[in-house]
Image (cartoon, rainbow, N blue to C red):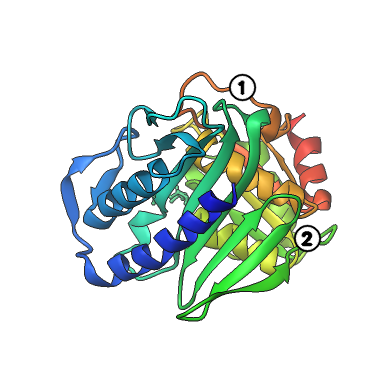
């Protein structure tokens, strides 16, 4: 497992260079979810796939950019890695922070098999957060990855990061989000799940939501590549992650590109979500 994390660290350094060197124009192609692709989406995907498949402990990989999982020649290898090579790529042209998300699954692509996860932040600095038994925060100083220590959420926070287009929200969702603002919560939403959730972790609490909407009744964010890995990180940091009613890490999957509504945050905020959605 450590070799997977080490490989993701090496990929992070290379992708951070690619982000500086490649065009911000979209290609003619789109991925399985119908999202338009940038050159750097494709290059980051190829780099991660190739690097991970070289490891003897990796049975296969599954990318948000590809329709199916890719398996290697080591059928007895224990791990399958699901990843989103560049989450928030619509923010590349505006030069906002974007990320890579990965989840390490033990033999099967399902939530209970997730045993570690992480994300990389391409911002003013190159950083990485990895959750195994605890959630560790790393920063690259140009030569080495330095461990900055463990991240932990407070019981209650002050940040509200509400995703989705408001015109497509359910009435109860708007009431819930408004109630946080009425209490003094601050709006912090960049449109990138990785920096938005990272900010809540760094500031010790709050709520990130991407609900079911009239234009996306099953939510927008993908279970295997985005929501499960980040739910795992939030739980290990003392937070919670639910789809409104159920714990995210108990949800089934029907297909690798399944999406789900999601609410990730500190326990106090998630309790309020539960009361509204149950
Ligand atoms: P993409 O990689 O296509 O830019 O999608 C990013 C995801 C996620 O990172 C973010 O939370 C969400 O899309 C934002 O969606 P909205 O713009 O609909 O709020």
Q: Secondary structure at mark 2?
A: loop
Within 10 Å of disc 2 (Cα), the crowding (few <14, some 14-19, many 20+) is many
Outermost residue to the left: 28
| Mark 2 or mark 1: whose residue is earlier in sequence | 2
Q: Is residue 109 left or right of residue 73?
A: right
Q: How many marks overall?
A: 2
Question: Mark 1 = which residue?
Answer: 252
- Image quarter (top left, top right, bottom left or bottom right) of the C terminus: top right
Query: Where does the image place residue 1, in percent across and percent down from the top left?
Result: 59, 46
Q: In the depicted view, which residue is nearer to us: 259 or 276?
A: 259
Res 153 label: 2
Q: Secondary structure at mark 1?
A: loop
Q: Residue at x 82, y 59 (%)?
A: 156
34 to 132, vertically: above or below? above
* Residue 66 in view here: yes
Q: Residue at x 67, y 53 (%)?
A: 131
Q: In the depicted view, which residue is nearer to us: 107 or 272?
A: 107
């Amino acid at each position: 497992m450590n070799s997977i994390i080490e490989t993701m660290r090496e990929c992070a350094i290379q992708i951070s260079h690619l982000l500086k060197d490649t065009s911000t124009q979209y290609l003619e192609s789109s991925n399985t979810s119908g999202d338009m692709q940038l050159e750097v989406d494709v290059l980051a995907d190829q780099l991660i796939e190739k690097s991970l498949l070289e490891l003897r402990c990796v049975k296969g990989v599954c990318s948000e950019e590809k329709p199916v999982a890719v398996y290697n020649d080591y059928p007895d290898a224990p791990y399958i890695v699901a990843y989103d090579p560049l989450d928030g790529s619509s923010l590349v042209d505006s030069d906002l922070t974007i990320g890579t998300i990965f989840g390490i699954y033990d033999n099967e692509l399902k939530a209970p098999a997730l045993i570690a996860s992480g994300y990389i932040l391409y911002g003013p600095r190159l950083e990485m957060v990895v959750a195994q038994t605890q959630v560790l925060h790393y920063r690259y100083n140009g030569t080495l990855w330095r461990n900055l220590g463990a991240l932990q959420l407070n019981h209650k926070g002050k940040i509200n990061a509400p995703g989705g287009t408001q015109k497509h929200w359910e009435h109860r969702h708007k009431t819930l989000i408004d109630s946080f603002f009425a209490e003094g919560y601050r709006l912090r939403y960049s449109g990138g799940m990785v920096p938005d959730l990272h900010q809540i972790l760094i500031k010790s609490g709050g709520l990130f939501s991407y609900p079911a909407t009239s234009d996306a009744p099953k939510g927008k964010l993908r279970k295997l590549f985005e929501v499960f890995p980040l739910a795992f990180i939030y739980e290990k940091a003392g937070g919670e992650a639910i789809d409104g009613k159920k714990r995210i890490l108990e949800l089934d999957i029907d297909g690798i590109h399944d999406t789900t509504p999601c609410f990730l945050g500190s326990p106090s905020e998630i309790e309020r979500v539960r009361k509204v959605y149950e």
